Image (cartoon, rainbow, N blue to C red):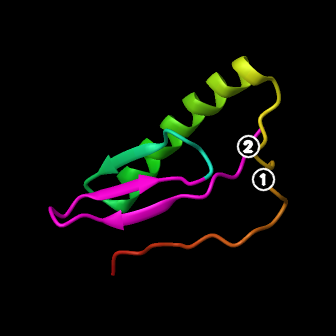
Amino acid sequence: MERIVNLHIEKLPEGMYLATSDELQGLVAQGRTIQETVEIARDVAKKLLEAKQEREGEVPFPPARENFDYPLIVNA
């Protein structure tokens, strides 16, 4: 099941991007681009959610809805 986990992404002084989540403790991802950072964060979140589900049973994050807003980042 797809879940929604909110990310906070910031550009670091070195030019890299850092993604964290206030909702999912332990989620930290860093990449050269926003896209790479989001892809890494997705993998980390999946592993954290699977581990949480094994330990605690049901995962408290809402399933993805039928429609929602998504910020599209375009390099133009």
- Point out residue 67 in the picture as x, y percentages from the top left corner: 80, 66
The three-letter code of the residue at mark 1 reads Ala
- In terms of sequence position, does the residue under pointer 2 or pointer 1 come before the other? 2
Queried whether the magenta region covers residue 10, the answer comes back as yes
- Residue 62, compared with residue 66, is above or below; it is above
Q: What residue lies at 76% left-to-right and 23% top-to-bottom? A: 56
The local secondary structure at tag 2 comes to: loop
Q: Which residues, given as a range, are shown in magenta?
A: 1-22
Secondary structure mostly taken by the magenta-highlighted segment of the chain: loop
In this orientation, which residue lies closer to the viewer: 12 or 42? 12
Seen in the image, is 69 located left or right of residue 27? right
Seen in the image, is 47 located left or right of residue 68? left
Q: What residue lies at 52% left-to-right and 43% top-to-bottom? A: 42
Q: Quadrant of the C terminus?
A: bottom left
- Residue 68, compared with residue 76, is above or below; it is above
Q: Which residue is mark 2?
A: 2
Q: What residue lies at 59% left-to-right and 44% top-to-bottom? A: 24
Seen in the image, is 13 located left or right of residue 59? left
Q: What residue lies at 77% left-to-right and 35% top-to-bottom? A: 59
- Residue 47, compared with residue 72, is above or below; it is above
Residue at the far left in the pictured view:
14
Q: Which residue is mark 1?
A: 64
Q: Quadrant of the N terminus?
A: top right
Q: Residues within 10 Å of mark 2 (few under 14, many from 20)?
A: few
Q: Quadrant of residue 50?
A: top right
Queried whether the magenta region covers residue 42, the answer comes back as no
The three-letter code of the residue at mark 2 reads Glu
